[in-house]
């Protein structure tokens, strides 16, 4: 598998494209928006510049990585020669099913179709295709070029051959694959999201403030980042979406999103991506907030 198509040039998509390209794979990065593709390539370039400055890669390796990536706004053209397609679009079931239905028609019959979903059923996504045995979950962690873990999620019909191929591929890009079964939230978010939600509930109930909650978890539990700051980094809209998937999937009130989280998303306070969440990330306060959190 030398041709890897990645659908979506956002945070996860450009990170996945960066990782494969840096490991000498030919990457076709696909998005419906040319502006999103340009922004994605700019992010990859910026991240590579940071790696060069830290002497983790050379200028030559940076240049080669960028040359390994080709961008497309046309899905058919982008996936034409792909051995593996990794979908990294918005965490929305209908959208993912539509993409996989299209991929099933556009890709060759031996192309493996993977989704980077962080919570949605692989089996349900695979049902939109005529090749459910070729559909699998590859849940990368953010930031993709740095984080080692990849959750590999087997759908109900995923074949052993496909599972073994994706596990081996993950190792070839210097990741550590962990196989998990297809339940809402898988392992990472089934454990993480209730913790984040409970942290928001703690704030909502007036037990303590944002800084106090995060400081307790950082200093008392040795977490590198407090749960509220982590929620901002993930995106509060993403956290809400994952909690809703788990609440709907398990029919258990413990996964019900905190009203404060719901209201913040409705108000457009999504965390880092919008400039404000539990912390203010505006240019004026950005340096101050970062220094406080990492002091």
Image (cartoon, rainbow, N blue to C red):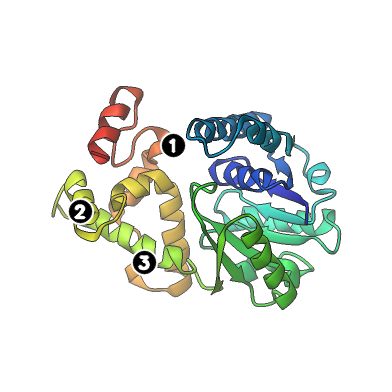
Compare marks 2 and 3 and give the one earlier in the sequence.
2
| Disc number lying in front (2 or 3) | 2
CA–CA distance in space, label 2 to label 1: 26 Å
Image position of 66 with respect to 217: above or below: above
Q: Is residue 124 left or right of residue 55?
A: right
Other-residue count near label 3 (Cα within 10 Å), few / some / many at <14 / 14–19 / ≥20: many
CA–CA distance in space, label 1 to label 3: 24 Å
Asked whether residue 132 is in view, the answer is: yes
**Mark 3 falls on what kind of element?**
helix
Point out residue 42 in the picture as x, y percentages from the top left corner: 59, 29
Q: Which mark is residue 170?
A: none
Q: Residue furthest left?
A: 207
**Mark 1 falls on what kind of element?**
helix
CA–CA distance in space, label 2 to label 3: 26 Å
| Disc number lying in front (2 or 1) | 2
> Measuring 70% from the left and 35% from the top, which residue is drawn there?
64
User: Which residue corresponds to mark 3?
Assistant: 255
User: Which residue corresponds to mark 2?
Assistant: 219
> Measuring 20% from the left and 56% from the top, which residue is drawn there?
202
- Judging depth in this view, the residue of 257 and 193 nearest the camera is 193
Point out residue 47 in the picture as x, y percentages from the top left corner: 53, 35
Asked whether residue 204 is in view, the answer is: no
- Judging depth in this view, the residue of 253 and 11 nearest the camera is 11
Image position of 159 with respect to 189: above or below: below
**Mark 2 falls on what kind of element?**
helix
User: Which residue corresponds to mark 1?
Assistant: 273
């Amino acid at each position: 598998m030398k041709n890897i198509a990645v659908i979506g040039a956002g945070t996860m998509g450009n990170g996945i494209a960066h990782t494969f390209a840096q490991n000498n794979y030919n990457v076709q990065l696909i998005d419906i928006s040319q502006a999103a593709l340009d922004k994605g390539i700019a992010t990859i370039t910026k991240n590579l510049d940071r790696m060069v400055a830290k002497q983790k890669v050379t200028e030559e390796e940076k240049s080669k990585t960028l040359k390994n990536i080709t961008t497309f706004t046309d899905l058919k053209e982008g996936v034409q020669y792909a051995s593996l397609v990794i979908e990294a679009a918005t965490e929305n079931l209908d959208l993912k099913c539509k993409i996989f239905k299209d991929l099933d028609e556009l890709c060759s019959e031996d192309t493996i179709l993977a989704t980077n979903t962080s919570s949605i059923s692989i089996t349900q996504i695979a049902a939109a295709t005529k090749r459910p045995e070729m559909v699998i979950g590859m849940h990368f962690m953010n930031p993709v070029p740095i984080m080692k873990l990849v959750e590999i999620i087997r759908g109900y019909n995923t074949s052993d051959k496909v599972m073994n191929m994706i596990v081996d591929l993950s190792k070839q890009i210097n990741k550590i694959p962990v196989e998990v079964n297809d339940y809402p939230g898988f392992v990472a978010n089934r454990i993480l999201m209730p913790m984040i939600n409970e942290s928001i509930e703690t704030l909502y109930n007036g037990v303590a403030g944002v800084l106090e909650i995060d400081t307790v978890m950082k200093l008392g539990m040795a977490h590198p980042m407090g749960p509220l700051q982590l929620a901002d980094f993930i995106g509060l809209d993403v956290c809400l979406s994952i909690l809703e998937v788990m609440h709907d999937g398990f029919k258990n009130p413990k996964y019900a999103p905190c009203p404060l989280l719901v209201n913040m998303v409705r108000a457009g306070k999504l965390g880092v991506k919008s400039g404000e969440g539990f912390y203010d990330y505006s240019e004026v306060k950005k340096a101050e907030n970062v220094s406080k959190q990492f002091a």
